[in-house]
Image (cartoon, coloured by chain):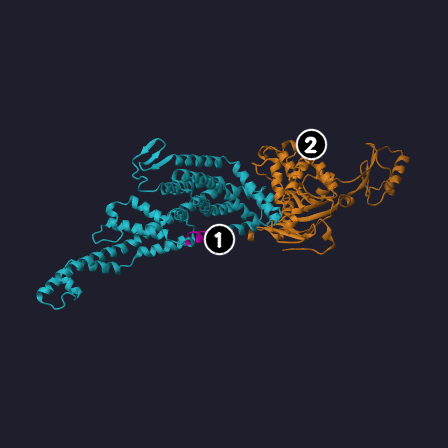
Chain colours: A cyan, B orange
Amino acid sequence: MILLLRQTAAVFVDAYRELNAKKLFWITLALSGLIVLVFAGVGFDDDGVSFLIWDLGFIPIAADVLSPEIFYKIIFTTFGIGIWLTWIATVLALVSTAQMVPDFVASGTVELWLVRPMSRVRLLATKYLAGLLFVAMQVLAFSGASFFVIGFRGGAWEPGIFLAVPIVVLFFSYLFCIQTLAGLITKSTIASLLTTLLFWFALFLLNTTDIALLQFKLVPEVRQEVIQARIDRQEENTLVLIRSDWREAGVEDWETRVPTQDEYDEKNPLIAPNREELEELLATPNTVAVWHTGIFIAKSLLPKTSETIELLNRNLLSSNELEQLAETFRDDEESDAREPAPNWSDQQIMEESSRRSQIEIRNRSIWWVAGTSVGFEIFVLMLALVIFARRDF
Amino acid sequence: MTTASTSPAADAALAVSGVSKVFGRFRKKVYALRGVDMTVARGSVFGLLGPNGAGKSTLVKVLLTIITPKSCSGTMLGAPVGHKPTLGRIGYLPEHHRFPPYLKGKQALDHFAALSGVARTDRRQRVGETLELVGMSEWADHKVGGYSKGMRQRLGIAQALMNDPELVILDEPTDGVDPVGRRDIRKVVERIASEGKTVFLNSHLLGELELVCDRVAIMVKGRVAAQGTLDELTAPDRAYEIRLADDEMPPEQVKTMLPQDAKIEGSVIRLASDDPTLAQPVLRELLSNGRTIQSARPVRPSLEDLFMRVVGDDSGPGGSRSEGAGK
């Protein structure tokens, strides 16, 4: 056990020294510091948003409609995590760590590592975990500084901010496992970096396709509801006219009798085309749904980078806070736009489909988001471990 | 593939048999090792030599689990070859090794010693000792990336000694080192041996091995062609050489008294034994016949002579493309 701890500590200390020697590590850390300073410079009160001494009046929100706590959390998750850490800093981290595995397995170096009383599997697994140190340290520094900014500026001392550390590290590990495998196979820094970036781009395309197809899949569903609402309203209005006719004609149960479909259609010729449209819609197979199912299955097998980062939002921003945010940006006219109305335009149908798709994506289980992604990562790592354990150097 | 031996050689530092290794598959097979048998006694300095591509480094890598053999049975320090915990008792200097350039000399030693399981307090002490031993104390706080080839080689040897190993395997330890450095490294090897450690030297620099090794093995094309002490290996070629003055020839009386295996080449008489007592009657007869003895000395072939005899014309690259070709 002592031997295991000693060797593990040695691998981690070495990883730290390697990072410490890289300029890019310190450049990234300095940029993180700069971003936190900019973050701290953003003011938010009843008058609106400001930056240092400048009033940013063009941003139409103020503390009377949105709490400063939510405002700063949103800035942190959207810009700090969503853009800086998961895009720019991740690219810098991939560039910084791309050399790690090819250098490790290079002839002349790997022998020095392999002739130790340590199994190859444990050696590579420890190296892999140590490689995540770059991102862990960057995110920890960024989250720590942001914690104080949100505390002092937003008045909320939110320890949940530090969830960014495991979540962003988890996100990065999806890419890093590919980089490790590619580095092991190709022994080339450039090849492993390019492979990882291509893989990341493929995941991005898959995610974009998933969102788009999900939205289009929901369009017929919303359209059906709109047409149904239109038919319901038309029948409601027509019922008044039919019953008026029945009363004048002396029909006994004119008040309780329900007209047949033919009676509705005879009285209001506009209902039939809507009903036909609805029947046609119901009869038309939703091919987009089939395609989306395929994409969803493929996505289930692969890492879900965007949704993993979204887990932070789920934890940092409660449903009530998100509701408050949505209310802030929603126009008064749109305030009751959740229930499909008979007169909805195509644009409104698309917007509702988009809203529902976002809800569906947000409601995807943590198991599906993180569990299956980690499953993929474990598969790739196992592959790398088997290759490393069996290879002659 | 690797099994422990129960033979008497099990108490040797290294006793392996039937070590074979094939690289590649199908038609691209290269037979790097073809059933190597080898025994290295504890406390000895053992030299492994052979032409480039003979399989020396492959054999060392098999012993140290860097390469998986096709077959290998035997023990190293009493444990089956491939037993990972035993590697903590072995020091190894790889050929063409590369230390991480961002580490300082003492950090590199500390790091690899920690991987070998050396405790922190011991590491601190050993860093100073080993750097002192290889003459690198002044460079302890310099980054390895700025070291010369010779300095890196010295640091590599220090690294191999950090875990106070029972068996030290040095693969081309003087590669890229100047003559002064070679002498220093030789002294280091002698010092290690004097501490009772077993030293396994892998080199193609015959002069170095001859000076320090108790036993040698010569590998040719993946096989051990000869193995033993230098005395044992050179015994068949030892002789006693009597050289007469330039224009003098041995008289007929001397020719008739010479043993059958003696040779006469011009003014040189070569007896097939280096025993000086056997040469005395011949010397007396030559002197009594008025011949001038220019020199009379026992002749022992050098390691280079032995090497050339064993390797002969068969010194091309070791691994052959097919099993049949090598047989």
Kindly indicate whether the residues beneath marks 1 and 2 are on one polypeptide chain: no
Q: Which mark is residue A379?
A: 1
Q: Which mark is residue B136?
A: none
Residue A373 among magenta residues: yes
In the rendered view, would you say A146 is above or below A337? above
Q: Nearer the viewer, residue B320 or A392?
A: A392
Q: Nearer the viewer, residue A305 or B53?
A: A305
Which SS type dominates the magenta stretch? Answer: helix
Residue at the (54%, 52%) spot, across then down: A386
Rendering coords of residue B125 (x, y %): 67, 38
Q: For the view shown, which residue lies furthest in the right direction?
A: B288
SS for dot 1: helix
Q: Which mark is residue B180?
A: 2
SS for dot 2: helix
In the rendered view, would you say B166 is above or below A286? above
Q: Chain of mark 1?
A: A
Residue A348 among magenta residues: no
The answer to whether B313 appears left or right of B24 in the picture is: right
Q: Nearer the viewer, residue A133 or B155?
A: A133
Rendering coords of residue B248 (x, y %): 84, 33
Tell me where the magenta segment starts and ends, as one range: A368-374
Q: Nearer the viewer, residue B222 or B42?
A: B42
Q: Nearer the viewer, mark 1 or mark 2?
A: 1
